[in-house]
Each structure stands twice: as C-alpha cells, then as structure tokens.
Amino acid sequence: MKTSKIIIRKIGFLSAFILPALLVAGYYQGGIGYFYPLIFAFVCIPLMDYYVGEDRYNVPKELERILSTEQYYRLITHSWAYLQVILLVWACWAVAQDPGRPWYEWLGFTLSTGVVTGGIGITVAHELGHKNNRYDQWMAQLILMTVCYMHFFIEHNHGHHVHVATPRDPATARRGESFYRFWWRTVTGSFRSAWNIEKERLTKAGKPVWSAHNRMLWYMVLPLLYLAFLFGTVSLLVDRLAWEVIPFFFAQSIVAFSLLEVVNYVEHYGLQRRQLSNGRYERVRPIHSWNASHMISNFFLFQLQRHSDHHAYASRPYQILRHFDESPQLPAGYPTMILLALVPPLWFRVMDAKLDEWQRSYGAPPAAA
C-alpha cells in the first residue's frame, strides 16, 4: 500500500505538464482552444478534486530520506525551469505570428499563458528557491525573471517566512480584507520589503546599495533584458518588428504574479500568531496556514497546499510534505478557493466562519483589516 501511494504520486506530479501541452494544442485549434488551460485549471481540476477527494497519506519516516534524495523529483522541477523559458519564446512567437485574431482569443491566450507561467511556474520557482544549492536557486530566479517577479526570491525566503501571520508580513491577508485590497498592499509591500532586506544585507557587508552588488537592481533589469531577447528573436522569426511581444509579456507576467498573490491570500487569510510579552511573536506552528489535502490539485501544485509543513520546515522537499490534522483545513483545493476569493462576499461568508472556528479552537485572534 505504501509503495502504491508513492508510485501514484510520482506519476501525479507529472500532471503539471498537461497545462503547457493544452496551451500549445489550444493555440493551434483556435477558438475555445485559447481558453483550454484556464478551463482545465478552474473547472476540470476543481471537479476532479470534488470527486476524487482528499489524500491525507504521509510518507513514512523511514522513507523520507530516500525520497528526499531521489533525483526523479528534482528532474521534474529542473525540466520545468527550462521549459518555461522556451515556452515563453514560443508564446511570444504565436502572438506575433497572427496578430489579427479577435481580441477575446488573445485575452484567452494571455490568461492561459499566465496560468501556466504563474500557477505552475512560480510554484516550481518557490520550491527551487528554498533549496540550499546555488543551481536550484539560480533556476528559481530564472523562472521568476520570466514573470517580472524576481524580488519574490528575496522577500519570500527572508521576509514572509520570518513574519508570516503577523502584521509585518505583506503576504498575510487580514480578516475582512478583500483580495483586491490585498493585491495592491502585497504587490507594493513585498517589493519594498525585498528592497529593505537587500539594503540591510549590503549595509552589513559594507557594500554600497546603489551598485552591482544589489540584487534588486539586477532583478529589475534582467526581465527587461529577457524581454529584449524575446522581442529580437521573434522579430527575426516573423521578419518584422514584433511589437505585440511587449504588451503580451507584461500582461502574462501580471496574470502570473497575481495568481501567486491570490494563492498567498488563500494560504494565510486572517491567521495571526500570538504576540508575546517581550514583543516577539510565537513560533510558526501548523495552525498558522490554511491547508488542503485534495489529491488532484496537490499533484499540479507539487503539494503546495500542505502549507503548514512547508512553513515549519521550509527546506522540506515537496515530495515528503506532510498533512497535519490540527492545521486549519480549507473546504476545497486552491483552484476552487481562488475562484471564491475573486468574489469577496462569498469568500467572507465561507472563510470568516472558518476563522471563527479556528479562534474557538486555538484562542488566537484573527487579524483584522
């Protein structure tokens, strides 16, 4: 039984590659095909989650070390990093190849591309960014470059994981705060946080902030250099100046990092750590992240939905993340909860009741907007 569950997961984690395949196939079909990844992510996966249900199986301790070092799991994430860079070259070519298509088809293609580069791509970057070797971290930054969100590499590791579930964390949504209010606060706040973290690092090292040592400056320049590469390459391929590449690149980036931020919204909405008498906050516990153990969406998201274990042990590989019964549980997987978050009255009706239940269980005050 243990072996069969591990094999199912091994195969399941490959399902993420369905989305880029749908993006390419949908483009060549045209029409409704432009929306295939969008439909699959937010209609098919929620339906499969509903019918297949949850998977609360945890890898036995004696197998954790073996699975943690198995190269198969690294190969999946490494392959995605290079796929995303190549996929965006193709997508930009596709936009420039036939710019005369109806606007709604290009809207579908742009949204679908952002779902792929953000929903899967940034999830992979998140996983690689927590590794302790430079190659994995480099690939995480490579992926983030393709969606204009490289500062996430700094802020997430050194800001969010330190301040999660406190008022100091721009990525923790407050009770009563709609996603739309949260989006502006977290996008701007995360950038400022990353800048301040980098500034502090350079100051301690005795290096000037306005210099080539500042990663934040590179993080602003590198996406523009990648865009220049895309623009030049596609222009050569279509034998004209492919101006469509520029708005498309930024549009898919906005969709991608907005998807990241709505996931942040879902993961920590209203949860807050107790502030101790010394002014510090209690340590992060499994009760400080919303979890979902729905099998299908966890395949596509590399078990990101087992978020409590990730915050307790940030370097734990995705293949051995654990389910905790004591963690607050979402009523559905992330794709469904994302749709709910986009409709604030429905979100508040469902999640504020869950927050009240959490408060009764743990006696901790939900964060207020």
Image: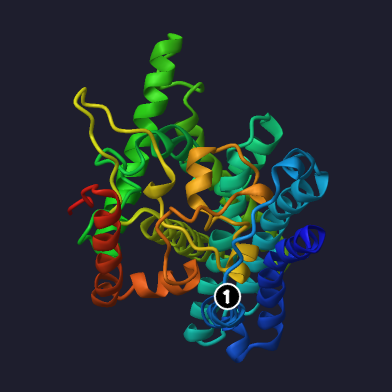
Name the image quarter holding residue 65: top right
Task: Tell me what residue is drawn at x 56 percent, y 68 percent.
Answer: 294
Instruction: Please say if 80 is above or below 188.
Output: below
Characterize the local packing of mark 1: few (<14), some (14-19) or many (20 or more) Cα atoms within 10 angstroms: some
Instruction: Please say if 218 is above or below 365.
Output: above
Name the residue at the top extreme: 206
Task: Tell me what residue is drawn at x 54 percent, y 38 percent.
Answer: 314
Residue indicated by mark 1:
53
Task: Tell me what residue is drawn at x 32 percent, y 37 percent.
Answer: 192
- Residue 88 in percent (x, y) is at 64, 61
Q: Quadrant location of the C terminus?
A: bottom left
- Residue 18 in percent (x, y) is at 70, 72
Q: Nearer the viewer, residue 329 or 301?
A: 329
Q: Secondary structure at mark 1?
A: loop
In this rendering, position of residue 75 left or right of residue 347: right
Task: Tell me what residue is drawn at x 61 percent, y 82 percent.
Answer: 36
